[in-house]
Image (tube, rainbow, N blue to C red):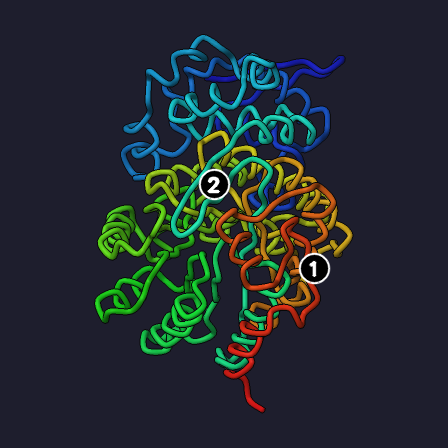
Amino acid sequence: MSYHARVGLLSFAFDDLRTLLARASPLRSGDQLAGVAAGTAAERVAACLALADVPLQRFLQQALVPYETDEVTRLIHDTHDEAAFAPVAHLTVGALRDWLLSDAADSAALAALAPGLTPEMVAAVSKLMRNQDLMAVAKKVNVVTRFRNTLGLPGNLAVRLQPNHPTDSPAGIVASILDGLMYGAGDAVIGINPAADSVPALVSLLRLLDDIVQQHGVPTQTCVLTHVTNTLQAIEQGAPVDLVFQSVAGTEGTNRSFGVSLALLDEAHAAALSLQRGTLGSHCMYFETGQGSALSAGAHHGVDQQTLEARAYAVARRYKPLLVNTVVGFIGPEYLFDGKQIVRAGLEDHFCGKLLGLPMGCDVCYTNHAEADQDDMDNLLVLLAASGLNFVMGVPGADDVMLNYQSTSFHDALFVRRLLGLKRAPEFEAWLQRMGITDTQGSLLPPGSATALQGSLQGRLPP
């Protein structure tokens, strides 16, 4: 089925729904690289006009990636909740936008609607929205998850304490953990990207993290961000695994390039649940995503990168995760060229994930060869935090010395919490007060106030 629209004296035709969605996307380098982007601003406007008139029902009738050959498509269609979809089933994409921005679309209504929306629907409506529209709607969605603390409460912003080290040095990791805790970071997770990939090395890191958390009664969760098969082996060896991590994407082929399938993720989820390590809840999965991964894997099927990113959220949604993190600028300028494109993508990802019912965080980041700088990241950090983001990254000095990219620092998280009056996870905040790190208002106390924690962790460091 083709789609048509006019802009002034110009007429445009779009061969199918896949093409229409791609041409309606705001400009980004990845879609240009894939050859699916609009050629002109006029063509992009025409695509948006045509897309606004598409009935939402059509996304249930026409698969962008073939149902017969793609398990992500099958997951999306086979698990679609028709009853939840019913209140908006009569709408077009443009009418859905209007409804989402109305007072009728409050937090309760959006939570009830989430199982009835498909990734393609939310990607489509995001293409018709300005940045402020994406923020206004995402702000209304609260996705609360629990493991050892409570994440996603309104007015809260959590931080993943990311103590990466280029050689996995225990002393270097502990130093970064101490640094982060003293800045009140770590309520989302203390999560290491390991430099080594051997299972014994991973088990050692898991035990190091667990020892710190258990010794000091820190109400948070830990994770070593390795491949899911390594985590399964670590579980078999009795390692203290809190969260199972995996990068996921929006097509079966891309997930295959990551070495994962839904069946493997099902196995890992069941294994993590069997450990019963959560004290407040059983949300035990941590997923990361990023626009451009499908094109990088040669498995994009001619679909634009933002729509495929939204499809990755269908994979994550299956497992009711504790955390979902869009690593927005990590893949590089080939996919998001500059600060403007990174900011837009971050707001899109947060909006789409929240509408689908996910606890969205964002690694507000860029690579050193992108046309972006820390001012761009400051802008995106504030925009996302104002939009109700669940968590951000906390990296010493904002410079990850293992992954070699720029992210957000412990100082950045402290800044945005102060700026917008945001709180930490309540159980974590209470622990910080008991340890003498913060006062009853959540403000940091002088470093000498937390002598017990400092003395214990510094005792692990070389003299």
The answer to whether residue 113 is above or below residue 363 is above
Mark 2 element type: loop
Rendered-image quadrant of the N terminus: top left
Graded by Cα atoms within 10 Å as few (under 14), some (14 to 19) or many (20 or more), the crowding at tag 1 reads some
Q: x%, y% of residue 136?
A: 64, 27
Q: x%, y% of residue 130?
A: 69, 27
Could you tell me if the residues under marks 1 and 2 are in contact, i.e. CB atoms within 8 Å?
Answer: no
Q: x%, y% of residue 436?
A: 60, 63
Residue found at the far bottom of this picture: 463
Front-most of residues 300 and 429: 429
For marks 1 and 2, the one nearer the N-term is 2
What type is the residue that disc 2 sits on?
Pro
Q: Viewer-nearest of labels 1 and 2?
A: 1
Residue 8 as seen in the image, left or right of residue 163: right
What type is the residue that disc 1 sits on?
His
Residue 193 as seen in the image, left or right of residue 159: left
Q: Residue at x 41, y 15 (%)?
A: 57
Q: Residue at x 63, y 51 (%)?
A: 440
Graded by Cα atoms within 10 Å as few (under 14), some (14 to 19) or many (20 or more), the crowding at tag 2 reads many
Mark 1 element type: helix
Q: x%, y% of residue 22?
A: 56, 32
Image quadrant assignment for residue 371: bottom right
Q: Which residue is mark 1?
A: 411
Counting the numbered discs, the total is 2
Q: Which residue is mark 2?
A: 359
Image quadrant assignment for residue 97: top right
Q: Which mark is residue 260?
A: none
Image quadrant assignment for residue 12: top right
The answer to whether residue 441 is above or below residue 62 is below
| Real-space Cα separation, disc 1 to disc 2, in angstroms | 23 Å
